[in-house]
Image: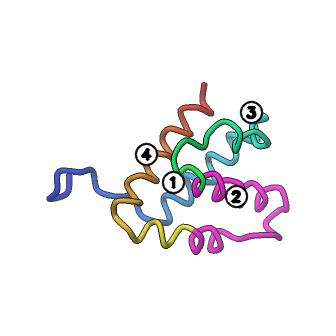
Amino acid sequence: MSQSGLTPLKTTHKLVLEVYELASLARRRGKSRTLRDTTILFPIDSILIEAVTLALRHISSGGLDFSQDDIEDYLQPVLNDPEQHQQFEVALAALRERLSN
């Protein structure tokens, strides 16, 4: 726990890996095309879905379209703000739950 009583925030690298895991899960479950329709509830969800979409494009292109660094760059403004960073982690966990069921 951090001094504020919140769970410490994950590193950018760890979150990008989790975005890739969600992209792979969505692809395996055949939900990659419907992510936008079913998961955007809050503004942070749009940012998460865009990051997952970039990861999906990277996976499907064999790494020729985007790189992990591109996704890190896309997420950096959000992850630099502790409040948005926390919201992003919550959105990531919620999406993982939705895709797992």
Say which element carries label 3.
loop
Name the residue carrying label 3: 29
- Counting residues from the start of the chain, the first of labels 2 and 3 encountered is 3
Residue extent of the magenta highlight:
47-74
User: Is residue 62 one of those drawn in magenta?
Assistant: yes
Amino acid residing under circle 1: Ile
What is the distance, in whole Å, between disc 1 and disc 3 at their CAs? Answer: 23 Å
Q: Quadrant of the C terminus?
A: top right
Name the mark on residue 55: 2
Q: Position of residue 96 (x, y in %)?
A: 55, 38
Residue 94 among magenta residues: no
From the image, state whether disc 2 or disc 1 is nearer to you: 1
Q: Would you place residue 7 above or below residue 77 in this image?
A: above
Q: Residue furthest top?
A: 101
Mark 2 vs 4, N-terminal side: 2
Q: Position of residue 88 (x, y in %)?
A: 46, 53
Q: Between marks 2 and 3, how big is the CA–CA gap?
A: 15 Å
Q: Earlier in the sequence, mark 4 or mark 3?
A: 3
Q: Report which residue position mark 1 lands on.
A: 44
Q: Secondary structure at mark 1?
A: helix
User: Three-letter amino acid code at disc 3?
Assistant: Arg
The reply to whether discs 4 and 1 touch (Cβ–Cβ < 8 Å) is yes
Q: SS of the residue at dot 2?
A: helix
